[in-house]
Amino acid sequence: MSAPLRTVEEQLHDVLAAVDPTATESVPLTDATGLTLAEDVRARVDVPVFDNSAMDGFAVRHADVAGAGPDSPVVLRVVADLPAGTGEQPALAEGEAVRIMTGSPVPRDADAIVPFEETAGGLDDSLERATVLRAPRAVGAHIRRRGEDLRAGDVVVSSGTLLGPLQLSAAAATGVDRVVVSQPPRVVVVSTGSELADPGADLRHGQIPESNGTLLAGLVRAAGAELVRVARVSDEERELRELLAETADADVVITSGGVSAGAYEVVKNVLGGEISFTKVAMQPGKPQAFGRLTTGALLFGLPGNPVSVAVSFEAFVRPALLAAQRRAELHRPLLRLPAAVGWRTPPGRRQYVPAAIDRTDPGRWTVRPATRGGSGSHLAGGLAQAEAYAVVPADVEQVAAGDQVDVMLVS
Ligand SMILES: Nc1nc2c(c(=O)[nH]1)N[C@H]1C(S)=C(S)[C@@H](COP(=O)(O)OP(=O)(O)OC[C@H]3O[C@@H](n4cnc5c(N)ncnc54)[C@H](O)[C@@H]3O)O[C@H]1N2
Ligand code: MOO
């Protein structure tokens, strides 16, 4: 009798328990896109930095113009002009206004802004007088208050966040110019198999184009890791041994192929004594190898079938690469969608089906298998149509059209 299959959760638990976070470093904002924040960013200044105008117009005392209307215009004397960037802080007496541009500091004595459009003269007649035709709706109208967005010292971006343009611009807006990030884990990808030829090469009978290297290289980079090397070895044990000896400075080594039950399982033969080979209750991706090499690098030995590689990466490798970067959210977003068609599922194994989403009706997306042959782990071409995985629990035997299915978005 073979050992019972491990659950995906049990395998993932062991994987995450083995992950060491990478070193941290301080980098300028311009170099931080795609990296993961390792320390909270706190605002250095208030946002807005000072009370400022939201409109081009006049800073006024609300009480002076509270009764203004088209039939009862109020004429104010303009005593100063405030372009953006000015350091001036003019005083305002009763009956006075200051011409002000969007973003300029509001004088202390003013408590409302009247846009040019609500005056008789507009911009053209704005340096001597303001003829106000409509009262501002309230005290504070069109004034953006100091600190209403963030106060100095507030957390702007939390540790564990993936840094993109929105997060980095928010940090810049609070006067921060550098952030502390996790260094990307260094990853080596190794495709194993004597049947593999470079994509584009002429094939003799028995050979196939190598595609897992391309798949894993892209997935590794998209997970924010540094791709150090992509290599291919045959099923000769010596080749894999020599290659592994050259990966001393890698944090993670990912192999594909050579982990199941055949006669030439090169990963199993070379590493069988060093790392553990298990069977996980998932389809595809049942045979999995995982452990630590003597160099300290984590090794993921993924099954060779291309769909198995893609699914195993999502289930185990991507969460590990994100954990190494201290990413707060390790998992892809899940949606629940009705199945457009039915399909069979394997008994006792969680199924991951490469899936396409029909978005024709924005209020009712549906999901269907992306590959014509269903869930076959060898259907590498159908991966091109996939943008998600339908994830079906181990105890479900059949998905019927209309059933609600968990869908993991990967694009
Ligand atoms: N007797 C058993 N046989 C198999 C079992 C089993 O439990 N008992 N498990 C099956 C399952 S499930 C899988 S998945 C595969 C995993 O096999 P390996 O990890 O040993 O992978 P290979 O045999 O090397 O390759 C499998 C398949 O994928 C193709 N391949 C491999 N590498 C690449 C690559 N870089 N690019 C494109 N295609 C690749 C390879 O040619 C094979 O067709 O084992 C089952 N067998
Ligand atoms: O579990 Mo295998 O990974 O079916 O292809």
Image: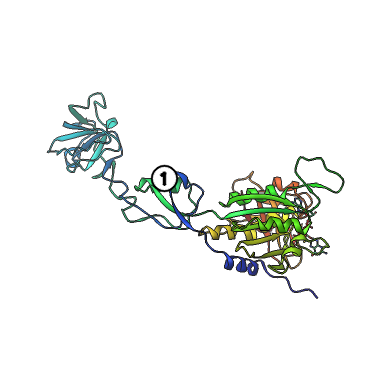
Residue ID at (69%, 68%):
274
Tell which residue pokes out farthest to the bottom in this image. Answer: 1
Q: Quadrant of ligand 1?
A: bottom right
Q: Mark 1 sits on what residue?
A: 169
**Snapshot quadrant of residue 276:** bottom right
Image quarter where the N terminus lies is bottom right
Q: Position of residue 366 (x, y in %)?
A: 66, 50
**Snapshot quadrant of residue 251:** bottom right
Tell which residue pokes out farthest to the top in this image. Answer: 124
* Residue nearer the viewer, 275 or 241: 241
**Snapshot quadrant of residue 293:** bottom right
Using the rendered image of the protein, determine whether residue 241 is visible from the camera's viewpoint.
yes
| Whether residue 13 is situated above or below residue 307 in the rendered picture | below
| Whether residue 345 is situated above or below residue 52 in the rendered picture | below
- Which residue type does callout 1 highlight? Ser
Residue ID at (60%, 64%):
296
User: In the image, 233: left or right of 121?
Assistant: right
User: In the image, 389: left or right of 20?
Assistant: right
* Residue nearer the viewer, 205 or 44: 205
User: In the image, 223: left or right of 289?
Assistant: left
| Whether residue 392 is situated above or below residue 229 in the rendered picture | below
* Residue nearer the viewer, 293 or 157: 293
Residue ID at (23%, 45%):
139
Q: Position of residue 176 (x, y in %)?
A: 36, 49
* Residue nearer the viewer, 260 or 312: 260
Residue ID at (69%, 53%):
190
